[in-house]
Image (cartoon, rainbow, N blue to C red):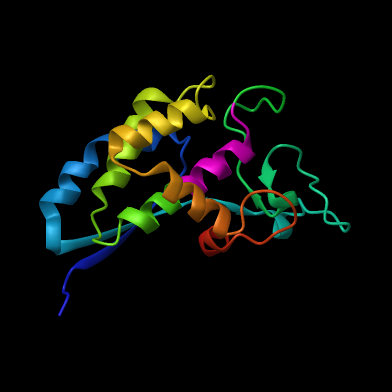
């Protein structure tokens, strides 16, 4: 029987307070091995509940949401015109959940930790947060297969249109 203690780890890709933890905890996750089972989760807001999806299914919360207002995150720099948007944060949240789904079945998910570390080092700036080449490079360095993650993101419902995304829905 599996007697590992299960831990849910809740974070936001842009939360600077958790960056140090995310960069350093992977060694502890490995050291705990069969004693602990981690599952990272992302804070994503229910845009329908928050009123971001209008009566006609349109996104009423500008660039804070994806899927026509269904899944939202706060604008980290409080500048709706520039920088990283809430929709960008939702996209990265979906990406990280898909990486965990693919590589975290052992409860340690070393490729997930490696990706987060690489992303924080290479892409965690306004200029590179959404840069696909930076993201692909971070994945490659972490041993994460980009195509598998893209399939997960698309097959879960994607981020466009008034479509339910099964991965994001589970995070609400």
Q: Is residue 48 visible?
A: yes
Indicate the position of residue 107 as horizontal and vertical percent values.
25, 60
Q: Is residue 20 visible?
A: no
- Answer left or right for 97 relative to 157: left
Taking 53 as reference, is 145 above or below it?
Answer: above
Residue 41 appears left or right of 103: right
In the displayed structure, 8 sits above or below 3; it is above
Q: Quadrant of residue 138?
A: top left
Q: Position of residue 36 (x, y in %)?
A: 19, 61
Range of residues picked out in magenta: 84-95
Q: Is residue 24 left or right of residue 53?
A: left
Task: Please report the residue visible at 67 percent of the width from the left and 22 percent of the height from the top.
Answer: 82
Q: What secondary structure is the magenta-colored segment mainly?
A: helix
Q: Position of residue 93 (x, y in %)?
A: 50, 46
Q: Residue furthest bottom?
A: 1
65 shown above or below 7: above
Residue closest to the eye, 77 or 128: 128
Determine the residue positioned at 50% across, 41% down. Answer: 92
Furthest toward the top, the residue is 127
**Residue 90 lies in the magenta-colored region:** yes
Screen quadrant of the C terminus:
bottom right
Q: Quadrant of residue 6?
A: bottom left
Question: Does residue 65 appear left or right of residue 145 in this picture?
Answer: right
Instruction: Identify the residue shown where x is 72% and y is 24%.
Output: 81
Q: How many marks?
A: 0
**Residue 19, picture quadrant:** top left
Residue 147 rendering spot, x and y as whole percentages: 45, 46
Specify the farthest residue to the left. 31
Is 115 magenta? The answer is: no
């Amino acid at each position: 029987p599996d007697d590992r203690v299960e831990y849910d780890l809740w974070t936001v890709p842009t939360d600077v307070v958790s960056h140090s933890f995310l960069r350093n905890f992977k060694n502890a996750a490995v050291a705990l091995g069969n004693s602990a089972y981690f599952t990272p989760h992302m804070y994503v807001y229910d845009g329908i509940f928050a009123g971001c999806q209008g009566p006609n299914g349109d996104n009423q919360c500008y660039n804070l949401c994806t899927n026509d207002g269904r899944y939202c995150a706060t604008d980290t720099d409080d500048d709706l015109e520039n920088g990283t948007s809430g929709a960008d944060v939702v996209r990265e949240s979906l990406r990280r959940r898909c990486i965990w789904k693919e590589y975290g079945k052992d409860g340690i998910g070393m490729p997930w930790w490696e990706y987060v570390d690489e992303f924080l080092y290479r892409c965690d700036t306004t200029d590179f947060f959404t840069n696909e080449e930076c993201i692909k490079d971070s994945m490659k360095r972490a041993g994460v297969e980009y195509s598998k993650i893209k399939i997960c993101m698309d097959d879960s419902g994607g981020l466009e249109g008034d479509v339910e995304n099964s991965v994001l829905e589970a995070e609400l």
